[in-house]
Image (cartoon, rainbow, N blue to C red):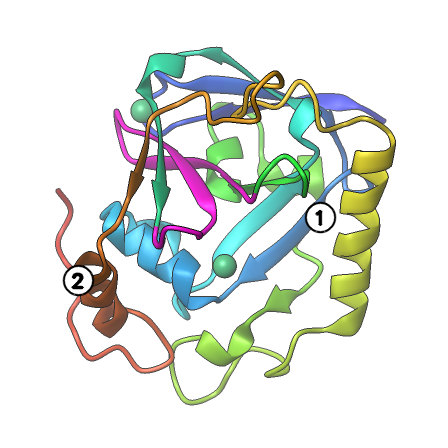
Amino acid sequence: MSTPAELRCRCGQVRGIVADASPDAVNRVVCFCEDCQAFAHQLDRADLLDAKGGSDIVQVAPASLTFVQGQHHISGLRLTPKGLFRWYASCCKTPVGNTVSPAIPFVGIVVQAFDGGRQRADAVFGKPIGAIFAKHSIGDSPVGSKGISLSLMARAIRMVLGWRLRGRTWPHPFFARETGAPIYPVTVLSQPQREALRPLCGPHPTAEKRGPG
Ligand SMILES: [Zn+2]
Ligand SMILES: [Zn+2]
């Protein structure tokens, strides 16, 4: 049941292990929200978005993720002062985990981070079980329903509560238990920096995406 899955950044310097990797132990959804799109553009990693701007995310319990290599490359980004902590490998701009705070224990990881080497994310986690925030998907025909699926939401809440109750918050890969503070450096975008990303995002981008680098 609990096969470990290897997470690695594109260049291979940052590596981690997700201990309990199986379709039942995680929540895999495609998120079309504007913030996930903006984050990918901020990193110049729009290649990670699907054709409609979706980010394919695997949510895992914090304690199941352990970084084993390249931790000094990990940095955090917040799109706003109270936004999600979006962690990434600064060596090659690969997202390695989105988090709120230890009080809401989950880590959302782009599925491409699990596709390195011989392992295939679909084989480990199964296919995505649905889409969220589809109203921000790019183009005139949104993916699936416009609202948030209640069953998907219920499943996510049940899972996060379960992790919390079963003590799967600690050790947290991104926060120190003693202080609750981030372990890695965090940058917050200024409001002009955040606004500059909006024309790149769905549902109707008005700017061309920037080239790599
Ligand atoms: Zn890297
Ligand atoms: Zn999102």
Give me the residue at 41% from left, 89% from top. 140
Q: What is the quadrant of the N terminus in the image?
A: top right
Q: Which residues lie in the magenta part?
A: 79-100
Give me the residue at 23% from left, 67% from top. 195
Residue nearest the observer in this picture, 193 or 112: 193
Q: Residue furthest bottom?
A: 140
Q: Is residue 200 magenta?
A: no
Q: Give how far across and how far down residue 101 sits, in percent.
A: 58, 39
Dot 2 or dot 1, earlier in sequence: 1
Amino acid marked by disc 1: Asn
Q: Give how far across and how far down residue 138 sits, in percent.
A: 39, 77
Against 129, residue 142 (above or below) is: below
**Of helix, strand and loop, which one carries label 2?**
helix
**Residue tagged by mark 1?**
27
Give me the residue at 32% from left, 19% from top. 73
**Residue tagged by mark 2?**
192
Q: Is residue 21 left or right of residue 201?
A: right
Q: Is residue 46 left or right of residue 85?
A: left
